[in-house]
Amino acid sequence: MNIAKNSLKCDHSINRDFPVDIHRSEHQRLGTVIECHWHENFELLYFEQGEALIYCNSRPIRVGPGELIIINSNDLHYGENLSPQLVYYVVEFDLSFIHSNKIDLCQTKYMTPLVQNRILFRNQIDQNNELLAEVRHLIDEYYRQELGYELAVKAYIYRILVLLLRFYGEQTISETEKDRQRKTLDRLSPVLEYMDCYYTEKLSLSQLSSMANMSDHYFCRLFKNLTGKSPTEYINHLRLNKAVTLLRESDLNITEIALAVGFNDSNYFSRLFKKYKHVSPSKMLK
């Protein structure tokens, strides 16, 4: 279906009068297309063309056309494009949009736990044709914006949540666990932001752990649990993704690119690049 085109913790400015945002994202460049971040809003990623690798809470998920990824509130996530042409839709909304002030069974059993982020869904959705059809109808309704489209969008969101509850509910977390998760994200947020800005510099473990006010050991364990990578692996991930861009778009040679992204040894850079990108930098440069 072709539909009309359109820091760490992202400040997604959704219209408070109608807190639903849907936009089309298109990329021709390999490498990172979704920076590492999280947010309070609920999000769906619907992939129309190409392949990508989406990391949700450190778990890598390979996705292709017609597939769907669910991003729960406060899920740490980022994504890499694996194809020459990647097209996907981002559907994001504030869960309080579906909440009502009227106290009834729907509110107490479903809406309130959803709004409080106590019900979580599986990130990877299999080929559920009914659910995918609802997502496509939602996107189409949002872009056409005919009279009453706000009611139709809200209705489709309810229908999508019902299907997710029936087939993809993964866990219910307590308020205590939710607070612990948020505190962990808040403690590591400045560190991740700093690494994203200064990945070309020499960053020591003690420097990073002190920013989070943690011991080196505890910081490494928490960082690995959250991102799926050690601090060194995460820094190299940032450097190699930047190197992909420079190899494709700049006039620099391999040694210059290695230095530009923070590697002092171009041979080590080439070995690491081939290990993680499965192609030599010289081939990508050509």
Image: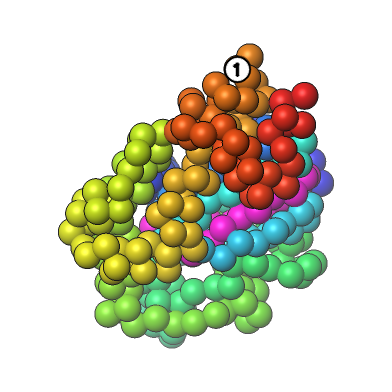
Residue in the foreground of this view, choosing between 127 and 23: 127
In the image: residue 38, left or right of residue 278: left
Crowd tier of the residue under label 1, counting other residues whose Cα lies within 10 Å: few below 14, some 14–19, many 20 or above:
some
Q: Amino acid at mark 1?
A: Leu
Q: Does the segment drawn in magenta span residue 46?
A: yes
Q: Residue at x 53, y 51 (%)?
A: 78
Q: Quick check: 207 above or below 202?
A: below
Q: Position of residue 153 (x, y in %)?
A: 59, 54
In the image: residue 268, left or right of residue 178: right
Disc 1, SS: loop
Q: Residue at x 40, y 54 (%)?
A: 231
Q: Position of residue 253 (x, y in %)?
A: 63, 19
Residue in the foreground of this view, choosing between 233 and 101: 233
Q: Quick check: 156 above or below 88?
A: below
Q: Position of residue 246 (x, y in %)?
A: 60, 25
Whether residue 19 is visible to the viewer of this picture, yes or no, is: no
In the image: residue 213, left or right of residue 3: left
* Residue indicated by mark 1: 252
Q: Quick check: 68 above or below 145?
A: below
Whether residue 273 is visible to the viewer of this picture, yes or no, is: yes
Q: Position of residue 185 (x, y in %)?
A: 32, 60
Q: Which residues are magenta?
A: 40-57
